[in-house]
Each structure stands twice: as C-alpha cells, then as structure tokens.
Image (cartoon, rainbow, N blue to C red):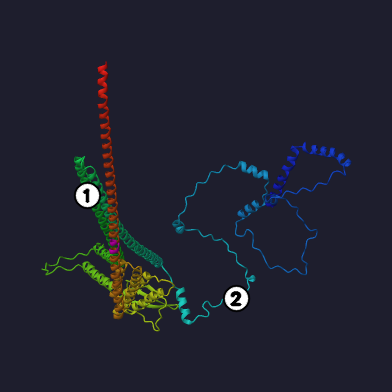
C-alpha cells in the first residue's frame, strides 16, 4: 500500500511542473495562435501555390526519458477465471507471515508496512533530519584478523517444519559411492577418504613443496648460467684466437713492409746524399774548401742523427710490440685462470650447499631429539620436585615416644626422596636411550607403496614412529610381493634405475640434447648407487658425455685449420683418449692427433716459405730501387758535369772578348794622345 501511494504521489508531482511551466510563460501560446490566424487567409488565397512540406523527423527518445515515461495500464473488460469444474482444491498452506515474532514486534511491523508517504513528507523529513556525522573511516582488517575472527551464528527461534501429513515418502536411493571398483581399490579409497591431516603435516608438505620448487628454480638458473658462461667462454676463446691470428699476421706483414720501406728509403737517401755531396764537392772544390768541409761535417752529423732516430724508433716499436704481446698473453692467462677459479668456486659452492643441507638435516634431527630429551627431563624434574615438596610437608598429627637408648649407628639411613629421584633419573636416561635407539632404527627403515600404479619410496622418520615420503618412481615396475620393511641397499637400486631412465629420456629429443641436465641427473643417480657396479654404470655414462663434448670441440677446432686451433684440437683429443677405455678408439684418436701434427708441420713450413719469399721479394725490390737510385745519381752527376763544362767555356769566351775590347781601348787612347798634343801646341 505504501509503495502504491508513494508512486502515485510522485507521479502527480512530476506532472505538475509541466503545467506550471506552461502557466509561467502565457504570452507564447497566444502569439502562436495570432500568427496562425493571420496566416490562414493567405493560405486560402494561395492554396494552390504553396507546396506541401515534408513531415519533420521526430527526435529519438533517450533511455532516461523512456524509463520515466508513464504508460497507460490496459485492463481487460472481463478477467479470466478458471471454471469451477476444472479447479482443484489446493493443499498448499503458506506459513504465517510474521511467525516467530512477538505481539509488539508484529504490531510495529504491520504499522510500518501500512504507512504511506508523499513527496512533501519525504522532503520535510529530510530537512528536519539531524545532520549525520561522518562515520570514522574503519581501519582495514588484515587477513590474519579475518582468519582468526569469530562470527556469531544466527539461528531462528522457531524452525519451519513441513507438516507430517504433507510429507511424502521418498523412493530415491543414492547409488553406491564406489560402485564398479574392486575390493582392494574400494578399501584403498576409503582409507584415503578417512585420512586426517594436522596443521603440522600440511605445513611440512608446503615447506617441502616450496623447497623442491626453489631447488628446481635454482637448478634451472644454475644450468642457464652454466650454459651462458660456456657459450660466452667459447665465443670469447674463438674471438680471441681469431683476433690473435689476425693481429699476428698484420704485425708480421706491417713489420716486413716497414723494414723493406725503411731499407729502401735509407739506401735511396744515402745514394741521393752521396750524389749531392759528390756534385757539391766537384763544383766547389776550387772556390770553397772550407765550405765543403763544413757541409761534409754537417751532413755526417745529420746522417748520424737520422740513423740514431731510426734505430731508437725501431727499438721503441719492437719494445711496444713485445709489451703488447706480453700483456695479451697475461690477459688470456688471467681469463683462463679466472674461468677455472669460477668453475672451482661453483663446484665448491655446490659441495658446500649439499654439505650444509645434510648438516642442517642432521642438526634438525639432533635438536628435535634434544628437545624431546629436555622435555622428558623437565617432566621428571617437576615430578621429583612435587614428590620432594610432598615429603617436606609436616604432618598435622604428631606422635611422641619415649627416648630410646642411644645406639651407635654404623651408617646413615638413606633418604627415600633421593632414592626416588635417582631411580627416576635412571629411568628417564634409559627411556631417552630407548627413544634414540628406536628413532635411529625407524629412520633406517624404508617402505614401498603402490599408488595407482606408481611406486613410492617412504622412509621412517627420526622418531620412534612415523614415516615420510622420500620420492615417487613413475615408470619403475611395482614388485609383485611388497614386503613390510626394506633397507637402503634394497630400495636405492630402484631410485638409481629411475634416474638412469630419466637421463636416457633426456637424450630422446629433437636437436642437440641438454647434456648439462643429463649430467646433473646422472650425478643424482650416483647418490643412490649403493654398489660399485651401479656407480661404474653412472660414471661410464658421464665419461661418454664428456667424450662427445670434447670430440665435438676437437672437430670444430680442427675445422678452422689454423696452427693454434689444431693444437687446441690435439689437447681435446688427448683428454678424450684419457676417458676412453677401448684400445681401438684410442688408436683412432692417436691417428687423428698424428694427422693434426702433420697439418701443423705443413702449415709451419708453408708460413716459413711465404716469409722467405716475402723477404726475397723485398730484397729484390730494394736492390732494384737501389740500382735505379744509383743510375739516377749517375745521370744527375753527368748532367752537372756537362753544365759545369758549358759554364767554363762561356767564361773563357767572355775573358777573350774582354781582352780584345781592352786592346781596342788602348789603341784608341794611343791614337788620341798625338791629337791632344797637337792641339796643345796650336793653343
């Protein structure tokens, strides 16, 4: 009722504002009417001329308007009723609406349901309502508090029950839970369903799973790191070898070219210098003896300085080359030592880790035994203390006797409390020894179980009772008759065979097998090799893997064909020979080593021949250049001699012409003297 009245009141209020909005602006509608009235006559006169306008498209209604829109309720005139002959008597009786409430609560709830509210009432109530204070922000509840929190259980006072006359007898029968299983499987499944687990067992299982996961991740990381290190090391060795070979070849070539160039330059300079000195000496022999001497001294000093500078430069370059070669050799040696040290450190860390894990397990077992021992000693001490306190308490009733005659006592009477404590301590020590002996005996026991076709190995705990699963062995056949108890020498061969099978399975892959993972699996199998024969099987497989890897490295190094690579291949083959027990294989390896040594000898002879040819070519080139220089110097000297002769002949001609002119001048002067004397006489 309250809901209907509320809807009606709000719907009326919503419609009212539309009318109010229309009444607020009353001028608009009359204006529209007058405009329409004015336009009417024009429409009548021009009816044929005005074309018909197209209908305007209606604006699409939004979802919000559709939700608020009021639709009329269609009610049929005649409601359908079920015919009386078709109607069946209902046997359903609904429960009391407010069953279980008191009379006051029932009256209060019915009054609340009968209330009606208008929009005005709601607005007034909202205005008059006291301002609520902002609730303080609740402190976030942690997961630990939620787990430990206790929640109340709400139970109704009166539970509804179906009347007895309405309850029909059920004919449903559930199928058998383990229908179709054999008797053994049914017994095993029921045993599994009946198992109970303590928090300690769950925690131990979680810790074991976390430890196994961490060990697997660590093994994968170590494996990836080892592979990466091996790849980087191989790449570095290859790059270093190639770089060393290239640098060596370049250095030899540069040294040969430089020596040839320096030799040719020195010979050419000497030839040019000798020619210049000879020409200068011949040209200035007569005029400047002192200058010739000074020039010769200066030339000798310059030559000595040049030769000294050349010698110092050659010595410095040689020292720099030797220093670079020594530094490079030291760097390669340091890199090799570093790699060996890292490998040794990794192996040492793995061994220390295994020893630490073993020591931790032994320590945990010892601490557990010590804790149990301490608890037992504490209980015995408390018990002895209680007995002692009870003995020390004074009784309420006192009995007095007459003093007996003094008798010399040979020994002091024993204290019963002290005797009791001694007996308790002896019993406790004996009990602790029994517990330790039983724990050691139980930990040396092994059990085999068949878990749906999978063989499991269980080991007794270091406790008088209890056992824990050691490992699963999928793929290992289950023995036909399983004994109650096994020893380590009986179950370890099964674990050894399981890891050997795992290593064999890792070989059946496409591409290159993961040899590091295979070696790790074989090393794990070695831990369960209880006999010498089993360990020899694992060691033989490890040697085979090492032989394969070393043979591959030897083939790769031999394929490069350089002297250094062939020597490295010989080293790999020697290691393979040490790991090979078969004499025929050793002979084949020795033949490969001999072939590589022959190749090395051929390469060295070829290099020596090439070097000799290069030196010979350089010497021939230097001789040719020297001959050319000498020829050029001779031609230059001949040209200078010819020029000097031309100069001398020209000077002789000039001197002759000068003498003739002087004679003519003297004759003219002699002829002019008589004329001057005649003029003097006439004057």
Q: Which residue is mark 2?
A: 172
Q: Please provide percent x and percent y for residue 256.
A: 29, 58
Q: Please provide percent x and percent y for residue 411.
A: 13, 69
Q: Please provide percent x and percent y for residue 609.
A: 29, 66
The vertical placement of 289 against 256, above or below, is above
Horizontal side of 274 relative to 73 (left or right) equals left
Which residues are drawn in magenta? 612-616
Disc 1 on helix, strand or loop?
A: helix
Let me know if residue 146 is in the magenta part: no
The vertical placement of 296 against 153, above or below, is above
Q: Is residue 362 among the parts visible in the rendering? A: no
Farthest residue to the top: give it. Answer: 683
Residue nearest the observer in this picture, 673 or 665: 673
Q: Which residue is mark 1?
A: 308
Residue nearest the observer in this picture, 176 or 247: 247
Horizontal side of 332 relative to 91 (left or right) equals left
Give the spatial CA distance, label 2 vs label 1: 120 Å
């Amino acid at each position: 009722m309250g809901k209907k009245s509320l809807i009606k009141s709000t719907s009326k209020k919503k419609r009212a504002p539309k009318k109010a909005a229309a009444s607020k602006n009353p001028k608009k509608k009359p204006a529209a009417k007058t405009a329409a009235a004015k336009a009417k006559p024009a429409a009548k006169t021009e009816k044929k001329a005005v074309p018909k306008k197209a209908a305007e498209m209606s604006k699409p209604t939004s979802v919000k308007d559709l939700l608020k829109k009021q639709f009329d309720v269609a009610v049929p005139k005649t409601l359908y009723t079920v015919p009386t002959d078709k109607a069946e008597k209902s046997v359903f009786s609904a429960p009391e609406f407010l069953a279980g409430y008191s009379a006051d609560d029932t009256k209060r709830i019915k009054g609340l349901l009968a209330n009606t509210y208008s929009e005005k009432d709601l607005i007034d109530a909202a205005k008059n309502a006291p301002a609520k204070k902002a609730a303080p922000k609740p402190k976030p509840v942690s997961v630990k508090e939620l787990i430990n929190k206790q929640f109340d259980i709400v139970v109704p006072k009166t539970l509804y029950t179906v009347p007895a006359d309405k309850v029909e007898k059920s004919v449903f029968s559930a199928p058998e839970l383990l229908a179709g299983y054999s008797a053994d499987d049914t017994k095993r499944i029921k045993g599994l369903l009946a198992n109970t687990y303590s928090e300690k067992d769950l925690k131990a299982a979680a810790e074991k799973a976390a430890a196994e996961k961490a060990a697997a991740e660590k093994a994968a990381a170590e494996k990836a790191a080892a592979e990466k290190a091996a790849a980087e090391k191989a790449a570095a060795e290859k790059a270093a070898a190639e770089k060393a070979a290239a640098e060596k070849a370049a250095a030899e070539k540069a040294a040969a070219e430089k020596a040839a160039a320096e030799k040719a330059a020195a010979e050419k300079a000497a030839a040019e210098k000798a020619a210049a000195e000879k020409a200068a000496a011949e040209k200035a022999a007569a005029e400047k003896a002192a200058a010739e001497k000074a020039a010769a001294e200066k030339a000798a000093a310059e030559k000595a300085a040049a030769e000294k500078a050349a010698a110092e430069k050659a010595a410095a370059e040689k020292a720099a080359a030797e220093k670079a070669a020594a530094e490079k050799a030291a760097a390669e040696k340091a890199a090799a030592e570093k790699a060996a040290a890292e490998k040794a450190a990794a192996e040492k860390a793995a061994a220390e880790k295994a020893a630490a894990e073993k020591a931790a397990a032994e320590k945990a077992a010892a601490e557990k035994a010590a804790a149990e021992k301490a608890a037992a000693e504490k209980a015995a001490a408390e018990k002895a203390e209680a007995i002692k306190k009870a003995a020390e308490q004074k009784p309420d009733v006192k009995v007095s006797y007459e003093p007996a005659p003094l008798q010399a006592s040979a020994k002091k009477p024993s204290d019963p409390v002290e005797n009791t404590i001694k007996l308790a301590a002896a019993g406790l020590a004996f009990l602790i020894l029994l517990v330790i002996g039983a724990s050691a005996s139980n930990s040396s026991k092994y059990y085999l179980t068949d878990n749906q076709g999978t063989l499991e190995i269980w080991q007794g705990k270091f406790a008088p009772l209890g056992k824990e699963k050691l490992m699963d062995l999928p793929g290992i056949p289950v023995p036909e008759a399983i004994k109650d108890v096994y020893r380590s020498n009986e179950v370890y061969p099964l674990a050894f065979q399981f890891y050997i099978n795992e290593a064999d399975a890792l070989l059946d892959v496409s591409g290159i097998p993961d040899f590091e993972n295979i070696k790790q699996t074989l090393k794990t199998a070695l831990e369960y090799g209880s006999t010498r024969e089993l360990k020899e099987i694992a060691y033989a497989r490890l040697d085979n893997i090492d032989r394969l890897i070393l043979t591959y490295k030897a083939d790769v190094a031999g394929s490069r064909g350089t002297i250094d690579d062939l020597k490295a291949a010989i080293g790999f083959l020697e290691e393979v020979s040490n790991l090979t027990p078969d004499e025929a294989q050793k002979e084949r390896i020795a033949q490969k080593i001999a072939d590589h040594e022959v190749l090395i000898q051929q390469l060295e002879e070829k290099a020596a021949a090439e070097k000799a040819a290069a030196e010979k070519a350089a010497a021939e080139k230097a001789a040719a250049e020297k001959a050319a220089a000498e020829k050029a110097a001779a031609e230059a000297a001949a040209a200078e001699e010819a020029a000097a002769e031309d100069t001398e002949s020209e000077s002789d001609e000039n001197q002759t012409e000068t003498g003739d002119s002087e004679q003519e001048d003297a004759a003219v002067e002699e002829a002019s003297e008589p004329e001057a004397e005649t003029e003097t006489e006439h004057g």
